[in-house]
Amino acid sequence: MSGDDDGTESGVSVVRGMKAAYALAWQACPSMLFVQLVMAAVGGVAPVATAWLTKVALDELTASHPRTGALMWMAAGIGVLGIAMASSSAVTTYAQGRARRAIGLLSQDRLFDAVNRMSGLARLEEPRFHDRLRLAQQSAEHAPDQLVQMGLSSLQGTLGIVGFLGTLVAINPIMAGAALAAAAPAMIAHLTLSRRRAGLMWRTSPGMRRKIFYQMLLTDLQAAKEVRLFGLGSFLHGRMLTELRAANNAEDRLERGVVRVQVFLAVLGALLAAGGLLWAMHAAAARTISIGDVSVFIGALAGLQSGLSALVQGIAMGHQSALVFHHYLTVVGSQDDLARPSQPRELTPLSHSIELRDVWFRYGEDAPWVLRGLNLTIPYGTSLAVVGLNGAGKSTLVKLLCRFYDPQRGAVLWDGVDIRDIPVAQLRQRIGAVFQDYMDYDLTAAENIGLGDLAAIDDTDRVRAAAERAGVHEIVERLPAGYQTMLSRVFHAGDEEDDKEELARTTGVHLSGGQWQRLALARGLMRQGRDLMILDEPSSGLDAEAEAAVHDRLRELRAGSTSVLVSHRLSAVRRADRIVVVQDGRILESGDHASLIAFPDGVYARLFRSQAEGYQEDPAPSADGAPPGESETAPTTVTAG
């Protein structure tokens, strides 16, 4: 697996990660970064100074004529250094907390700003991108701060190591060399393990995402009906545990290697410390070094070993954080999945037509063509209805009109201008839409509608007018807190002592599918005065009476404006100015309802007759009361209204 696949590039990624982390820290909270830098210097120098003052004090105590004044100054110096070390620890903890929060806020801001810059849908359909995005979200919370702390602790450790190493060299150069040599295998081992941990996170990411998916199904209200009815709970539970066990087993294998390495390093360190202690005791007994020398030697050896171990582990953890942070930097540095025009053209109000000219489109290089040389013109001020069987390309056509994707061949033209030459945000500002797969937002009723036009989300009159046009105003008015009712039970913010209206607003209620459909329609209708209105199955969740009322209202609203209606229900499209039948990615038939129905062997005519037959009266029942040809043991079906 290449570095780009698992995110385990070593040199470049670590350097890049460190630079990016410190840039974030400096931009997020420069004062706290400076404070931590000063405290790191104090923490590195103070222990070495304390060890030397202790040595000098012990030598003075064991002298034939100890100087009391000098001892007092030494004791005071040791006390001041102790206070400095204790204070630096408290100040560092405070500064770390402030810096961590500031860095986390800035890194999350930049991550989701990058996600929002992806104006198309293609990237969000890539499983690998979702794996990378999940790791990017995790690393955005912790990796930048970890990298900053690694750098600061490395500085502190290096200062201590240099001081203690100089001490050992002055007393026993051989022991100093041995301590340094023992750090080399520790560094290699920890860096290897950190690379393996980063690679493991990437390899197990798909399984972890599947585990989250199964957990969601086990707790999601919408999924609960089928999960309970079909008895899927144990099945999904088992799938979740399978993914979790696979990840746990991979981690266990890695951790067994960690244990072996740590035991080896601990034994090596203990042998080195024991050897140093034996030498110091022998040298002291032989009077070749003083008691103070023994004290500073033991302290320096312990400090050097501790400092080297902390430095090695810090570098290894920083290395791992940098490798995982690579996913964050990749997402943040991603380009828009829709090409930006080199010379953007200003979007003018639609005055002539929207045209799809020889459009070919597929969702991937290896995927089949969904649209095959499709040609279609939508004149300004007319209503177009698009019909066809599932998979014919109707919804894809809508996505191209909204420029969620760009065609592989051909072009979508707005008054003759290729929409790829128009800034995508300007284009979408001129489009209103209701999608078949509409969203149910866990927000208030007013917010669910107002999201259709953020500039007017607080405009109560606009929100109510959109609700009235969608036929949902009376439904919303009957909710416990009216338009301020929370349409969710996901969030709860209230106590039992709160008044009833406040509880309804904060605790929320559930709506039926048809009621949600009307709210989505109202959200689409918030966009007044747009050039193009797209209605993709706007009444699929409504009963027959509500559907007829909604389409009557929509016909009034679409009169004189440019609109595209996609629907399986041909009764809803018969009054469109023009109807096109899409099949196998091409326009098969085109005309108004009367002209299309006049060809009995045409696709539209057959579909219309097929749907119309479902509304015709059944033949008279037989003598036993059962419809002709239906046995008494026919299965019973119940249709929910």
Image (tube, rainbow, N blue to C red):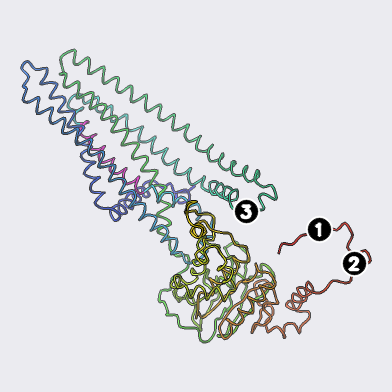
Please tell me the numbered disc located at residue 628: 2
Q: For the residue marked with disc 2, what is the amino acid?
A: Pro
In this rendering, position of residue 510 left or right of residue 316: right
Q: Callout 3: 10 Å neighbours few (<14), some, many (20+)?
A: few
Q: Along the line of sight, which residue is nearer the eye, 12 or 18?
A: 18
Q: Which of marks 3 and 2 is nearer the N terminus?
A: 3
Q: Is residue 207 above or below residue 176?
A: below
Local SS, label 2: loop
Residue 154 lies in the magenta-colored region? yes
Q: Are marks 2 and 1 in contact (CB under 8 Å)?
A: no
Name the side, left or right, on which 218 lies relative to 10.
Answer: right
Q: Residue drawn at (50%, 61%), measured in percent from left and top?
A: 443
**What is the magenta range?**
144-165
Please state which amino acid type lies under the numbered disc 3.
Answer: Ala
As shown in the figure, which amino acid type bears the numbered disc 1?
Answer: Thr
Q: Is mark 1 on a helix, strand or loop?
A: loop
Q: Residue at x 58, y 72 (%)?
A: 398
Q: Position of residue 496 (x, y in %)?
A: 50, 51
Q: Name the residue under label 3.
A: 223
Separation of residues labelled 3 and 1 (CA atoms): 25 Å
In the rendered structure, which disc, 3 or 1, sits on the residue that comes first in sequence? 3
The 10 Å Cα crowd at callout 1, few under 14, some 14 to 19, many 20 or more, is few
- From this view, report whether residue 26 is shown above or below residue 542: above
346 or 563: nearer the eye? Answer: 563
Q: Name the residue under label 1.
A: 636
Farthest top residue? 285
Using the image, determine if residue 532 lies above or below residue 148. below
